[in-house]
Amino acid sequence: MSGIRLAAISAEPLDLDAHLAAVDDAASGAVTMFVGRVRDHDPDAATAVVALEYTSHPDAEATLRRIASDAIGSSGAIVAVSHRIGRLAVGDAAVIIVVASSHRAEAFDVCRDIIETIKTDLPVWKRQVEADGTTAWKGLGG
């Protein structure tokens, strides 16, 4: 059975409990998670950040599945990962990754590999919206 229990690009709010339930497995002694949220600031922003608007390529979900599969490798880890698209407010979850495995080091390694590869390889882009109405595209080209 594939270790990928969930790999989704979603316009709906992400549900951490659903990700945790997806990787529930009696053989897993470790569960790690990463939640990437919209923050209210950016070093390049002149005013407060009020939203991020995410868009994706039609192949983004297949790419996300490949990223998860590559990170799992032969480890036996179980993964649930989602990336949100659309307009997100400060505090909204943009990415959720939950990894279950027999041992903690493996769970941490797979989780870190997934988020780092999402940042460079996933065809999802964001437009940052500031309080003064200024917008800027971020993350283009990794």
Image (cartoon, helix red, strand yellow):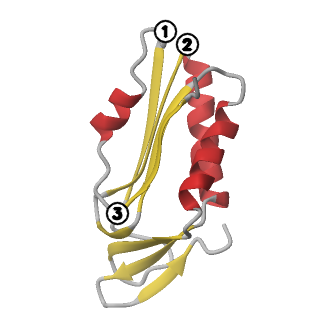
* Residue 95 image position (x, y, % from top left): 43, 52
- Three-letter residue code for mark 3: Ala
Which part of the image, by quadrant, shows the C terminus?
A: bottom right
Q: Type of residue at label 2?
A: Ser
Query: According to the image, label 1 marks what residue?
Result: 27
Q: Please, is residue 104 above or below residue 6 in the view?
A: above
The Cα–Cα distance between marks 1 and 2, rounded to whole angstroms, is 6 Å
The mark that comes first in sequence, 3 or 2, is: 3
Secondary structure, mark 2, is loop
Q: Position of residue 52 (x, y in %)?
A: 38, 72
Q: Is residue 73 above or below residue 112?
A: above
Q: Residue at the location (58% across, 51% down)?
A: 64
Asked if the residue at tag 2 contacts the one at tag 1, i.e. Cβ–Cβ closer than 8 Å, the answer is yes
Q: Please tell me which residue is depicted at 60% across the width and 58% down the height of the picture.
A: 119
Q: Which residue corresponds to mark 3?
A: 11
Quarter of the picture holding the N terminus: top right
Q: Residues within 10 Å of mark 3 (few under 14, many from 20)?
A: some
